[in-house]
Amino acid sequence: MPTSMRVMELVRFGDADTAFATRELPRPTPGPGQVLVRVEATSVNPLDLQTRRGDYRDQVALPAVIGNDVSGVVVETGPGAGDFQTGDEVWYLAPIFAGQGTYAEFHVVDQALVARKPAALSHVEAAGLALVGVTVWEALVERAGTRVGERVLVHGGAGGVGSVAVQLAGALGAEVVTTARAKDHEFVTGLGADVAIDFSTGDYVPQVRELGGVDVVLDTVGRDTLARSPEVLADRGRVVSIVDIPEPQNLLAAWGVNATYHFLFASPGRAKLEALGRLVDRGKLRPVVGAVVPLADIAQAHTLLEGGSVEGRSRPRGKIVVAVHQ
């Protein structure tokens, strides 16, 4: 096994095309209760863009290896790490802002955060589901407590998080309403959305109210979503926002409908991955992979996710996955 590994290191905050450099670093060694994973694939998330731009510069010391999704193969186990063996295919969400990230050929992680990869998923697919899947599970199950027969509004159903949220809400037995551009309506209804609303050509609020309102709002887009959610919520409705740097908004209207707000920053955990894996096995959940790029082209992946164009390609639906050892 090699004693070094290739990584894409964040060397400066700013634009994607100048932020990263290829580096050779020592291959990490697993400690007690840890496993060393050969990273087959990782992915790019909005959190990565914010980190690269410097939004979290107080928590990220340069140079740094960022990234949080992993699907790969266990190649070494540390003392007491008996849950896995060499050769096991695994997937996980790495701790955020804690230790080396996943834009690397190898990654060390506590075995308690790791789950066996669903056999139905390729490494590329699993890497595209880890962070968004855990986020959506926490949002709709652990925070909102979504119940059968409720109505859920997912903002941005064609995005990486939204495409998983539409599927999970449907799997929970909810009626699913989502906002998406008209060109994406066939896509989101194919994922299981019952109603798709074009947010770009009119106000979504009157259209949702005509349906009778919703019990849960999942905010993946920011802007004025928090302030306007009470206009579409049923009494004792719940709002979950994953927008970690929201604009200041007046939430006084939330008192009128007894609304509960949750602000979510996803946390790793094996149980959540196993729950997602069971839904995958039942055919209820599938990651949407819009593009796959090699590790050396991580800057291009960032540009695509930001909405830029790379070699004629524009931002795809779903996730942008980074193939590391493929």
Image (cartoon, rainbow, N blue to C red):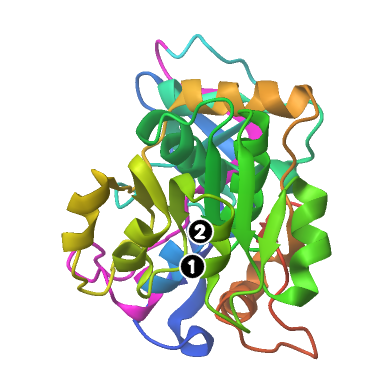
Residue 89 visible to an observer of this rendering: no
Q: How many marks are shown on the rendered structure?
A: 2
The CA span between labels 2 and 1 is: 6 Å
As shown in the figure, which amino acid type bears the numbered disc 2? Arg
Q: Is residue 114 left or right of residue 319?
A: left
Direction from residue 39 to residue 97 in the image, left or right: left
Q: Residue at horizontal 49%, vertical 51%?
A: 213
Assess disc 1: are there few (<14), some (14-19) or many (≥20) residues with their C-alpha within 10 Å of its C-alpha: some
Residue 144: quadrant of the picture:
top left
Residue 9 in the image, given as x and y percentages of width and height:
45, 68
| Residue position marked by numbered label 1 in the rendering | 205
Closest to the observer: 146 or 71?
146
Is residue 139 visible to the viewer in this orientation of the structure? yes
Residue under the image location 45 percent in, 72 percent down: 49
The question of residue 65 being in magenta is answered with yes
**Residue extent of the magenta highlight:** 51-80
Residues 159 and 17: in front is 159
Amino acid on which disc 1 is placed: Val
Q: Position of residue 263 (x, y in %)?
A: 28, 50
Say which quarter of the image contains residue 315.
bottom right
- Labels 2 & 1 near each other (Cβ < 8 A): yes
Assess whether residue 277 is covered by the magenta stretch: no
Magenta segment's dominant SS is loop
Q: Position of residue 226 (x, y in %)?
A: 32, 63
Is 216 left, or right, of 211 in this rendering?
left
How packed mark 2 is, by other alpha carbons closer than 10 Å (few <14, some 14-19, many 20 or more), is: some
Disc ID at residue 209: 2
